[in-house]
Amino acid sequence: MNDINGEHSQNSYFEELSYKEYQKRDILNENNGKINFSEIKERLKEVRNVLPVYTKKEIKSLEEEFYVLKTYEEKLKFWIDKRLGLTKPDLSFERKFENKVWKIPFKIVPLNDTESNLYFDYLLQWFNEININSKIKYFTFETLKTNLLENGQLRRKTINKELNQTKNRINDLISNEQFFTQKFVNGFRLNQNLLKDLYDGYLTTDKIIVVAYLLSPILGYLEYEKFLNQKLKNEDFISDEKMKSEEKGGKGNYLLKGHTFRKTNFFTTENLDKLRIELIKQNIIEDISFDDFKDIFSEQPATKVKSRIIWKLENNRSSATYIRYDWQSLLSLINEVVEPDFVKYKGEIKELLKWYFDFPDNTLSNKIEDSFSDYLTTFEKNHRKSTKEIIEIFKKINK
């Protein structure tokens, strides 16, 4: 009997020793200082502070909506749509029944591996989109994709450049956080769900939140990398041969047949919106949405454009009896934003102006057919110098 007790004590001793050693190695153990938990808690508190505060009555109403949902994924989407905060996965309200007050919970705490994986995936995306980690500068997938597509038709060279930059960003984030990131990156690229492999201990809901928080900055770059690789695989870009044909012998920005103007690379989408606002404010164009304005200057397929830019600026020879609109300022604007080769693409520029611009009295189409060569000749004689109105607007934009 003593031998049995002695053996049991010895086993308990080694189990306890083994557990203590594991605790020392455990990166999610707050006591060993491997991860800055205090900072993470502060960041999570910041997120919760901007979420709406619901009254007891509102929470009760939410629970009634929540109760009819069947799948765990539906419940997660509900939690996000109602801005309940994925870092607070359980809520409750009080209900009186038979003179007793009962606390009624409703929650999205994952109960098995499948639910844990779904919770982790949604949490990652949620963290990435709300930019919780202010110490690390990163971008969401939607931001990266939108910025790329707004620059016009894709080229192989552009895609490869974006891929290299994205891989560098991923490698920088891997070096910043060594505990989970490399495993997650490898798993994402292989389309594997690695939650259970990222950590060798029992993953509580709180620990899943910490892991997702630490990995969230890298998610957008990985999604963007996959998107770019798919574009290359599908050859969803303008071929190099076509580009060489378009650019050959040019003395300015080229124009792609069947597409709108292409703004210069250094003229950002943000500046394009500033330009639109100033042109409207100075009464040079009529009000137009940013998307419609942007499409005319971001090399979109011709069929995508829904509205024209209505050019209101009159020249100094205009009078009450005969209105003359300022062609030189219009050409100045095109030159500043697009810098096209006016000689090589004279015909294309004429057509683009005809289809995507007009005057308030709808006369631009007729006038451009009759006199475009004269307008362009005058512009060239003035060495494509911008007019005073356009110069002033660009001064404001570039401040």
Image (cartoon, rainbow, N blue to C red):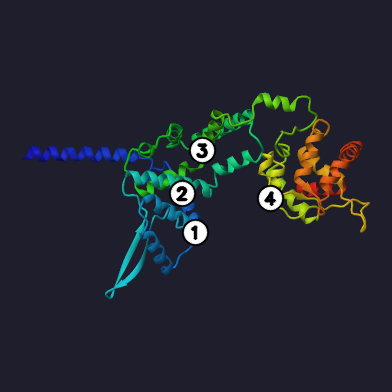
Quadrant into which the N terminus falls: top left
Q: CA distance from mark 3 to mark 2?
A: 24 Å
Identity, as a three-letter code, of the amino acid under mark 2:
Ile
The label shown at residue 360 is: none
Q: Nearer the viewer, mark 1 or mark 2?
A: 1
Q: CA distance from mark 1 to mark 3?
A: 27 Å
The reply, left or right, for residue 125 in relation to residue 348 is left
Residue at 39% x, 37% y: name it.
Answer: 193
Residue corresponding to mark 2: 40
Residue 240 at x, y percent in the picture: 66, 25
Residue corresponding to mark 4: 290
Question: Marks 2 and 4: in contact by CB < 8 Å?
Answer: no
Residue 274, above or below 335 = below
Residue 27, above or below 186 = below
Question: Marks 3 and 1: in contact by CB < 8 Å?
Answer: no
The label shown at residue 223 is: 3
Q: CA distance from mark 4 to mark 2?
A: 38 Å
